[in-house]
Image (tube, grey):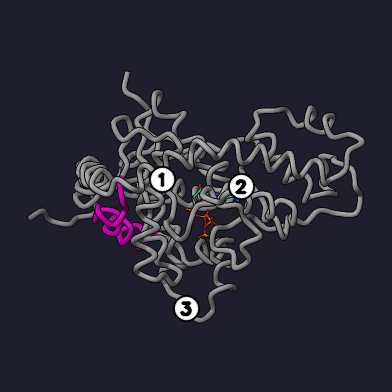
Amino acid sequence: MEKKIVFSGVQPSGALTIGNYIGALRNFGELQDEFDCNYCIVDMHAITVPQVPKNLRKNTLDVLSMYMACGIDPEKSTLFVQSHVPAHAELSWVLNTITYMGQLNRMTQFKEKSKKSDENLNAGLFTYPVLMAADILLYQTDFVPVGEDQKQHLELARDLAERFNNKYSDTFVVPEPLIKEFGARIMSLQDPTSKMSKSDSDENAFILLQDNKDKISKKIKRAVTDSVGIVNYSDDQPGIKNLINIYSVLSGKEINDIVDMYSGKGYGVFKSELAEVVVEALDPIQTKYREYLDSKDYLEKIYTEGAQKAEAKARKTLRKVYKKIGFISR
Ligand code: AQP
């Protein structure tokens, strides 16, 4: 039986956070044996907010190294850079022509990001979800492992697949999201009502996958909590709830067990033991990450071969699309 297809991407818009890891990357490796996986570094998405070219180059290799350090095996999965496969931009253009402005206007991420970046409110930020739909649909994707924040974008991808199929006959698989029950939305350490983001201007708001022990401890110690003083898993204590979620996912312990372990103990003990849990979970990832990052030739080989594999799959879908919409072939 043919394996079902998985696609997911991460933007090289900065160093990755434990939010990216818990919501997305940690799940990627687990899927490789059961599914035909395609993992992409979506650099074309990253330029929808201003990027320094030198940093974008560095972050692209960083994400590639982090992908492999988190367990993606390029022998099993197709691992590639989005801008190396022009079919993404090409399909995106076609999908733009069947996307309603009203749909894009309702996208929460656009609303939030446009508030932050009014000096560069570009059309790319507005049509970002269409490019994301193209990424997914090009590979005839069945499942998309993502964090909760991407659910709305995935709905659009499903909608566009159905709209195209209805208009031109069956062409695209309609993809399903794969969102874990726990950890799908890790919140900012400084404002537990908004999600942890790598582009947050306050570096105490996130823990980076590459942060050292000292930084991790300091950031957790400074994490915003409340005046209740009891380690409880409750919506009334969003800061502590978020920290318990991180503890649970990274240690493999149940939420109730964690609450029991810290009953009668203050936030100080809980926070310092959480820091140990985080450091221990990230240690093996950081070691591998540094090894990959030092092997520039190897990284080049991986992204070159990955682009060839991805290109072949993507072209097949794009050829079909062009034919159906009435473009004549060369
Ligand atoms: N806080 C989070 N909790 C759980 N999952 C998260 N993801 C991101 N933040 C969290 C998931 O990580 C994957 C890659 O995300 P992305 O880099 O493509 O874009 P994003 O969702 O916009 O992530 P950031 O960190 O907030 O980036 P910036 O600051 O550049 O916009 C996705 O699967 C996402 O769901």
Q: Residues within 10 Å of mark 1 (few under 14, many from 20)?
A: some
Tags 2 and 3 touching, CB below 8 Å: no
Asked which quadrant contains residue 188, the reply is bottom right
On residue 179, the disc is: none
**Amino acid type, mark 1:** Arg
As drawn, is 154 to the left or to the right of 207? left
Q: Nearer the viewer, residue 65 or 179?
A: 65
**Amino acid type, mark 3:** Asn
Asked which quadrant contains residue 247, the reply is top right
Q: Position of residue 268 (x, y in %)?
A: 82, 46
Question: Residue at point 80% right, 29% down?
Answer: 256
Q: Position of residue 275 (x, y in %)?
A: 68, 43
Q: Earlier in the sequence, mark 3 or mark 1?
A: 3
Q: Residues within 10 Å of mark 2 (few under 14, many from 20)?
A: some
Cα distance between the residues tagged 2 and 3 = 36 Å
Q: Earlier in the sequence, mark 2 or mark 1?
A: 2
Question: Residue at point 25% right, 43% down?
Answer: 298
> What residue is disc 1 on?
290
Q: Nearer the viewer, residue 215 or 54?
A: 215
> What residue is disc 2 on?
213
> What residue is disc 3 on?
120
Q: Earlier in the sequence, mark 2 or mark 3?
A: 3
Cα distance between the residues tagged 3 and 1 = 34 Å
Q: Which residues, given as a range, are shown in magenta?
A: 80-98
